[in-house]
Image (tube, rainbow, N blue to C red):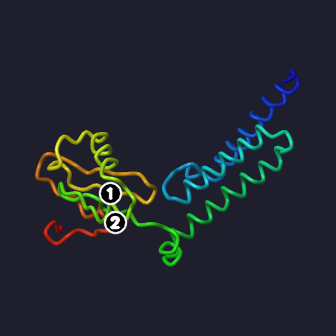
């Protein structure tokens, strides 16, 4: 690599990052939020475009800027439609699912979510759960994240926290 190549690479990096900062300021912080699977896919696409522009000398900053703007504009429109149009929301978003309830692992739900028991237990350890009896609910979020609601008291899970969560809870463990 020549000194000129290195200088051009540095300019490309500065240019494309300036473009991404401007786009983020225009479209807002949701640009890189991982609130849905679509947001996650958009973030990956943005990363891919960034890498392509920086590493491929055949790609121009203008082309990259247009690609990034298009991806993020589409993401913004998509998230607006998901929020405002019920049919769109039902078609294109996954509902969070309860995979553990009141200290009991829901094996059918684990299977549906393609989550292994070992993965669930690792998430419980990450959340500082000491005993299954502390677990009120574990929710497999639509983003692929796992939320663990736990305490060692008799506090129940607020129904507001379970809004829009798929509750396939056996009758014996019912709310």
- In the displayed structure image, the side of residue 30 where residue 113 appears, left or right: left
Q: Name the residue under label 2.
A: 165
- Whole-angstrom CA distance, mark 2 to mark 1, is 8 Å
Name the quadrant of the N terminus: top right
Residue farthest toward the top in the current orientation of the protein: 3
Name the quadrant of the C terminus: bottom left
Q: Name the residue located 71 percent from the left edge and 38 percent from the top edge.
A: 17
Q: Name the residue located 47 percent from the left edge and 74 percent from the top edge.
A: 90
Q: Mark 1 points at which residue?
A: 139
Tag 2 and tag 1, C-beta contact below 8 Å: yes
Residue 157: percent from the left, percent from the top?
21, 58
Q: Answer with mark 2 or mark 1, whichever residue precedes in sequence.
A: 1
Q: Name the residue located 52 percent from the left edge and 59 percent from the top edge.
A: 37
Residue 69: percent from the left, percent from the top?
72, 54
Residue 116: percent from the left, percent from the top?
34, 53
Figure disc tally: 2
| Depicted 171 relative to depicted 104: above or below | below
């Amino acid at each position: 690599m020549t000194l000129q190549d290195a200088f051009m690479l540095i300019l490309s990096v500065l240019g494309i990052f300036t473009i991404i900062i401007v786009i983020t300021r225009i479209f807002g912080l949701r640009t890189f939020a991982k609130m849905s699977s679509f947001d996650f896919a958009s973030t990956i696409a943005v990363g891919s475009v960034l890498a392509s522009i920086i590493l491929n000398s055949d790609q121009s900053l203008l082309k990259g800027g247009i690609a990034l703007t298009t991806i993020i504009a589409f993401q913004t429109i998509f998230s607006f439609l998901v929020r405002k149009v019920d049919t769109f929301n039902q078609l294109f978003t996954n509902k969070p699912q309860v995979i553990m309830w009141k200290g009991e692992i829901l094996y059918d739900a684990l299977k549906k979510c393609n989550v292994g028991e070992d993965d669930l237990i690792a998430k419980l350890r990450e959340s500082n759960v000491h005993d299954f009896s502390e677990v009120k609910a574990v929710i497999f979020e639509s983003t692929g994240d796992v939320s663990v609601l736990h305490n060692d008291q008799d506090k129940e899970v607020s129904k507001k926290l379970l809004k829009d969560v798929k509750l396939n809870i056996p009758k014996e463990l019912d709310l």
